[in-house]
């Protein structure tokens, strides 16, 4: 009986942990933006900084080589907010995926 209770408690704990992790994954989305004017390290720094100032942006990673920036964000952040932030730098951006 003791082993059964222990196994049951362990199963409940594992299930609740998996559910919490799934909820966290659903609370984030990833988007990739193409920024044609981003061609140096300073450009990448400025783009990252401007995007990270948006409430709900979790992380950003710019790639000078590809001219893209990958943004991990909360669902409340819109594509237009990201594009407008990049436009403040006088750069153009478009959603790749």
Image: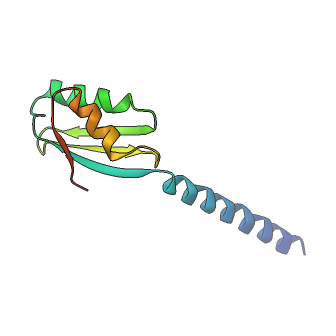
Residue closest to the eye, 3 or 81: 81
* Position above or below: 93 against 15: above
What residue lies at 50% left-to-right and 57% top-to-bottom?
26
What residue lies at 38% left-to-right and 27% top-to-bottom?
53
State the image coordinates of residue 43 (x, y, percent, origin top left): 16, 27
Residue closest to the eye, 75 or 49: 75
Quadrant of res 44: top left
State the image coordinates of residue 33 (x, y, percent, origin top left): 23, 46
- 21 left or right of 47? right
What residue lies at 62% left-to-right and 56% top-to-bottom?
20
**Quarter the C terminus occupies:** bottom left
* Position above or below: 5 against 91: below
- 38 left or right of 3? left
Number of callouts in the render? 0
What residue lies at 72% left-to-right and 61% top-to-bottom?
13
State the image coordinates of residue 29 (x, y, percent, origin top left): 41, 52
* Position above or below: 5 against 17: below
- 78 left or right of 86? right
**Quarter the N terminus occupies:** bottom right
Q: Which residue lies furthest to the right in this view?
A: 1
- 85 left or right of 11? left
State the image coordinates of residue 2 (x, y, percent, origin top left): 89, 70
Identify the colour scheme used.
rainbow
């Amino acid at each position: 009986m003791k082993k059964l209770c222990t196994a049951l408690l362990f199963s409940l704990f594992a299930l609740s942990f998996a559910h919490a992790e799934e909820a966290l994954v659903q609370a984030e989305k990833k988007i990739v933006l193409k920024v044609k004017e981003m061609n140096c390290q300073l450009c990448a720094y400025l783009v990252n900084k401007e995007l990270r100032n948006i409430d709900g942006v979790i992380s950003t990673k710019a790639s000078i080589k590809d001219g893209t920036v990958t943004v991990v964000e909360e669902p409340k952040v819109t594509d237009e907010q990201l594009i407008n932030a990049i436009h403040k730098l006088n750069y153009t951006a478009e959603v790749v995926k």
